[in-house]
Image: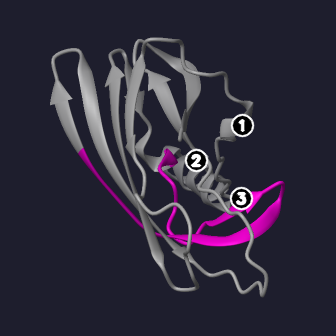
Amino acid sequence: MTKSIRIFYSLLTLFAMPQTAFAIDSQNLPDVPPGIVSIKTIDPVKLVGYTVGDVIEREVILTIKAPYQLIETSLPITGYEKRYKGQVIGIELKSVSHTKKEHDGSTTFDIKLAYQVFTNNVVAKNAALGPEYLNLINTKNSKELVKYPCA
């Protein structure tokens, strides 16, 4: 068998294999070590009285010390519906944006989250914006992944 035919069969085998994407389950990761992350959360001033269609905005300013870095693909995804004990509570993530500033020895992320109320209950009930889990990686040990609950 010639070299070009072997390469052809190798490529054919590679492309014929099912393509699998692996997601990181934040819930099963260990927590980030203390002192690595500092956070400032700016929650809405209005605590009650939201109705269908209202937008609730939250800003999170997160500073992460080296060698840890945020895995930016772990940011929440637009369209995600918040849940409490597995039940949809009628609050959906409408938009997410972030900026990144690098400093000596740390990185600061300004994350803006906008949620929209979609509940259609006749009776008023409590609903809360729970934590979003972000994943971090140790750049000195790429096998060390940790989670941080971004409240």
Q: Is label 2 or label 1 in front? A: 1
Q: Could you tell me the amino acid type at mark 1?
A: Gln
Instruction: Assign the magenta stretch its main secondary structure.
Output: strand
Query: 117 or 51: which is nearer to us?
Result: 51
Kindly identify which numbered label has been placed on residue 6: 2
Which residue position holds label 1?
27
- Whether the magenta-drawn stretch holds residue 64 is answered as no
* Quarter of the rendering containing residue 41: top left
> What colour scheme has been applied to the protein in the rendered image?
one colour
Q: Is residue 120 above or below residue 10?
A: below
Circle 1 — which element? helix
Q: Position of residue 6 (x, y in %)?
A: 58, 47
Q: Does residue 92 appear left or right of residue 139 in this picture?
A: right
Q: CA distance from mark 2 to mark 3?
A: 20 Å
Closer-to-camera residue (131/10): 131
For image coordinates 16% across by 17% down, the residue present is 104
In this view, 97 is above or below 89: above
Residue mark closest to the camera, 2 vs 3 = 3
C-alpha span from label 2 to label 1? 44 Å
SS label for mark 2: helix
Disc 3 marks which residue? 18
Taking the image as shown, residue 95 lies to the left or right of residue 32, namely left
Q: Which residues are magenta?
A: 74-99
In percent of width and height, residue 66 lies at 32, 16
